[in-house]
Amino acid sequence: MEKSKISVKQKIGETKGNSQVKGVELNVYSYFKATPAALRRSFDALMKDKLQGFVGRQFVFDALDDFLHSHDSGYFILRGVPGIGKSAFMAKLVNERGYIHHFNVVSQNIRGTRTFLENVIAQLIACYDLPYEELPPRALDDSGFLMQCLNEAAATYKSSEERIVIAIDALDEADRLGLAAAVNMLYLPATLPKGVYIIVTTRPLDDMRLQTMQQQILDLEADSEGNLQDITTYIETYIQREGMQKRLAVWGVSGAQFVAGLRKKSQGNFMYLYCVLPAIEHGEFVNGTLDELPDGLMAYYQRHWRQMREGNKTEFDTVYEPIVCILGVAQEPVTVQQISNWTKLNQGQVKENIRRWREFLEEEQTKSERKYRIYHASFQDFLREQVDLVRYDDMIADYYLELAGFSE
Ligand SMILES: Nc1ncnc2c1ncn2[C@@H]1O[C@H](COP(=O)(O)OP(=O)(O)OP(=O)(O)O)[C@@H](O)[C@H]1O
Ligand SMILES: [Mg+2]
């Protein structure tokens, strides 16, 4: 599949929390479309976010290309711990190569099998000019129609060099509910037609629920040479910023010392750097020593949690914690009004205090409203370990029961 002439390039301003304004350009492919059009999911916002400051990953591209060249078809699975950079790699891959794609995102409730099938099938139809204007009835009930489309798309090949590649991010976030024991996640077919490849990312799971005839797993190891090299490049690039140069001077450490120290503290995790580097830049670590930095991502979240709690214990228990925990269990981005309804805090309190969690949240501005969700799933993992979140699930359920007139 060739990249069509890049007709348009979009440029957006960076909007996220702490980092400086940086433009991210997305390639616009003529075949980033779908038939029927309404069925294509746009992941542009997610991709732009993940591509900010992207570095490296050549070794992953190389391993993937080896696989594509040495196999007729099959699954390439990129596996790694939360925050190591799987989704960012997928964003880069899709943006560079224009592959058909789907990102599972639990916090946006994009996790269903039918959602996946309709998005990918609609892209296949548009991309390979398949003769369907509507999806046939029952097209999303099993993998039959997906296979039919893959076969028909493969039949359009003019040379054996052509490939159909589908990129699927976060298989671990996809829905398992109601899936029969022998069925693959997302109804992914066990065998693929010649020339068809599926690239999947996942966290390490005891049971990935993906039985296939042909697959290769690449473990993105935190302490591998390739990963540490990319981590190093990221830190080296970041410390060129004026604010960081000043900070390093105050800390009295050389660039090389800082890079080596932070690389160790990060435990090879990109999400750690994404959180900690801006925090350092903004002077949140007051002692100014490398020892002060938390060891690993969970320790960073823990530190922030502790500081918030020590700041004001009563407010923490009655306001800060409920707000962030409700966001932790929400199935999709939510408004201040919803948080207020569920927690019974007034909207003013929610608005004022949501800012305290800003660095862990993603804000979405639609035409009519502003919505919030937890930025990274690893923070949800942390919350789950920290607090009994069932209480907050119950809070939401109680609200709707009351609305329906079932209150005691
Ligand atoms: N190669 C990279 N260059 C620059 N930044 C990166 C890179 N990889 C990841 N990041 C940044 O680190 C953060 C975490 O990465 P990402 O979301 O891709 O992790 P993940 O492996 O998908 O985690 P999870 O399993 O929780 O989904 C992202 O916000 C991303 O912007
Ligand atoms: Mg991810």
Image (cartoon, rainbow, N blue to C red):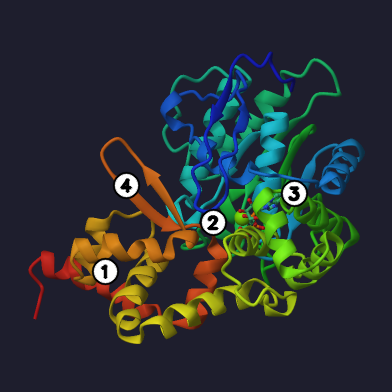
Residue 178 lies left or right of residue 247; in this view the side is left
Figure quadrant of residue 197: top right
Question: Which one is closest to the eye, mark 1 or mark 2?
Answer: 1
Q: Earlier in the sequence, mark 1 or mark 4?
A: 4
Q: Work out whether residue 170 or residue 333 is closer to the camera in this orientation and state it.
A: 333
Question: Which one is closest to the eye, mark 3 or mark 2?
Answer: 3
Q: Earlier in the sequence, mark 1 or mark 3?
A: 3
Q: Find residue 396 and name its label.
A: 1
What residue appears at the point 72 percent right and 69 percent down from the top-left corner?
Answer: 251
Q: Earlier in the sequence, mark 4 or mark 2?
A: 2
Q: Answer whether residue 52 is visible to the viewer in this image.
A: yes
Q: Earlier in the sequence, mark 3 or mark 4?
A: 3
For the N terminus, which image quadrant? top right
Q: Find residue 370 and name its label.
A: 4
Type of residue at label 1? Answer: Ile
Question: Which one is closest to the eye, mark 4 or mark 2?
Answer: 4
Residue 228, image x, y percentages = 84, 60
Type of residue at label 2? Answer: Ala
Q: CA distance from mark 1 to mark 3?
A: 46 Å
Q: Which residue is mark 2?
A: 174
What residue appears at the point 66 percent right and 24 percent down from the top-left corner?
Answer: 152
